[in-house]
Image (cartoon, grey):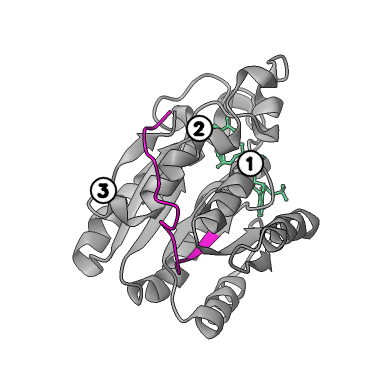
Amino acid sequence: MFDYQAPSQLLKDKVILVTGAGDGIGKAAAITYAKHGATVILLGRTTKKLDAVYDYIERHHLPQAAIVPLNLDGAGEHDYIELANTIEAEFGHLDGILHNAGILGERTPISTYDPTLFDKVMRINVTSQLLLTQTLLPLMQRAQNASVIFTSSGVGRKAKANWGAYAISKFATEAMMQLFSSELAELSPNIRANAINPGATRTSMRASAYPEEDPDTLPTPEEIMPLYLYLMGEDSLTTNGKSLDAQ
Ligand code: NAP
């Protein structure tokens, strides 16, 4: 596991947006960030799941969260602008984004990959990250320091047979991170961008990719959180443009 022990109040007073915050790694990250003092904006597709995370945060007397139900497949420019306006009105700035939401698509050969599904995977896994980051940039420019974390994958560095649109979307994610990182170094040096490869983690996405695997052999999302904390907090202020492994 990535070796980092976060101070208990690492993210005190920080406002952080987590996409796909209702389940899996995003849910663990949202709760972990709240436990380290952050006000977390929970963005996701299924309101019931977001409500459950919100309630957990409230029950444990952590900083009150905010919920943004948004289906990233089909979200339009106006949805992102509305989100930015809401964050501005509520908090005035933004200290971080964890781009975590994603779908697997189908594990089939690229030669016969369904083009409609290809577009959908790219919209959710890639385009939504572009639109969110672009729209929220002015709010991050107002932060003292801001961190944008993208979520990659092993197949985003070396594509493997039958990983289709998912692998391509993760290569694109690595490229997007590198572009934001190098360009923002000039434009807004207070904002850094990095990527995390979570590694095999016990979630429903992993179970659909590997139905034969025993999930109990895998680390839980909670166990891979040290890197998520490191990159979001100020101990990583000089880390920019890196793609790191959580495990
Ligand atoms: P997961 O359990 O399937 O969670 C994915 C999250 O993304 C869910 O909260 C889901 O919301 C949300 N999401 C999916 N489509 C969405 C949409 N159209 N609009 C808004 N939210 C949407 O997967 P996970 O394993 O935690 O994966 C999290 C990230 O890690 C992904 O980027 C994945 O590619 C990456 N990753 C995971 C592993 C692994 O072994 N688990 C390994 C490498 C990389 P709903 O629950 O409401 O559908």
Question: What are the residue bounds of the magenta stretch?
Answer: 1-17
The mark nearer the N terminus, 1 or 2, is 1
In the displayed structure, would residue 174 be above or below residue 219? below
Residue 213: image quadrant is top right
Pick whichever, 76 or 200, lies toward us: 200
Mark 3 → mark 2, Cα distance in angstroms: 25 Å
Q: Pointer 2: what residue?
A: 167
Per the rendering, the mark at residue 239 is 3
Query: Of the residues tagged 3 and 2, which is closer to the observer?
Result: 3
The mark nearer the N terminus, 3 or 2, is 2
Indicate left or right for 15 with 188 as reference. Answer: right
> Tag 1, which secondary structure?
loop
> Tag 3, which secondary structure?
loop
The answer to whether residue 103 is magenta is no
> Tag 2, which secondary structure?
helix
Q: Circle 2: is it few (<14), some (14-19), or many (20+) Cα within 10 Å?
A: many
